[in-house]
Image (tube, rainbow, N blue to C red):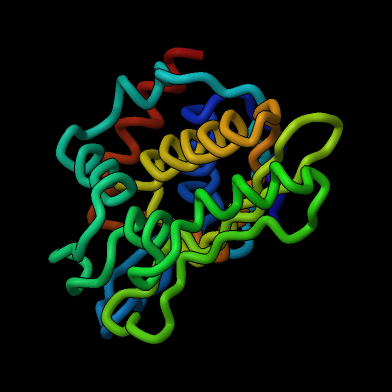
Amino acid sequence: MQDLGVFHSLGDVWIKVLSALSEYGAESVYTDNVGEEADVKELFDLTVKIQDATLPDAIIEKHKVPSEYDWMVRNFTVQGEVPELHHENSYASRLYSYMGKKDQVEWVIKRLKENPHTRSATITMFEPLTDEGYIPCVSLLDFQESGGRLNMTAYCRALDFGCKAYVNLVMLHLIQKEIAEKAGIAQGQMTLIVKSAHFYRRDMAKVMKILKEESKAI
């Protein structure tokens, strides 16, 4: 497990991971979903902790690509199939209408209200009866009250930090905020666990440009 430490900005997390991938990432061929392959820089079992982050984040606002940002926001907020993901269900469907039957966000809020100290306030993003062409990158969200604050652990099987992972950070922060507010518990720390943190080598120029600009800003 490679722990990158504690951060107070989602943008700082993004830049730190990109820097670590650029410097230490192993070059490999990433195979995903239905046999899709591409060259990447990759680190396994990466963890970060985020406390007291606020939005909008200056670094993300500076470097975000509107088309990919808006696409990921829709994935988290619009229910239905996603053509680009082999017509599998969006994150919004998995969160708010799991298998067409269960609002997991409402369920976890109710569970936390009934017992703020529960150790089983957990949401899964997998729909194994139907997932074939696409296996969700954001895999599991677990909520735990500690010291009067609601912490969230997000386990991700893979995140592409060269493209859309920074939007994942924003949307996960907002989900944690929503659940904390509705459960009546102050928002706490987010712990991110990523089995495969990577960026595609086709995005190398973009990554290096971001890192160069941010190094000048320090």
| Left/right of residue 156 with respect to residue 98 in the rendered view | right
Please report the residue visible at 43 percent of the width from the left and 83 percent of the height from the top.
Answer: 128
| Left/right of residue 130 with respect to residue 55 in the rendered view | left
Where residue 179 appears, x then y in whole percent?
56, 38
Closest to the observer: 123 or 2? 123
Residue placed farthest to the right in the image? Answer: 147
Q: Quadrant of residue 83?
A: bottom left
Please report the residue visible at 79 percent of the width from the left and 53 percent of the height from the top.
Answer: 118
Q: Quadrant of the N terminus?
A: bottom right
In this rendering, does residue 212 appear at all?
yes
With respect to residue 79, does 184 lie above or below?
above
Residue placed farthest to the top in the image? Answer: 217
| Left/right of residue 22 with respect to residue 61 in the rendered view | right
Please report the residue visible at 44 percent of the width from the left and 57 percent of the height from the top.
Answer: 103
Closest to the observer: 104 or 29? 104
In this rendering, does residue 42 appear at all?
no
With respect to residue 77, does 129 lie above or below?
below
Please report the residue visible at 45 percent of the width from the left and 20 percent of the height from the top.
Answer: 55
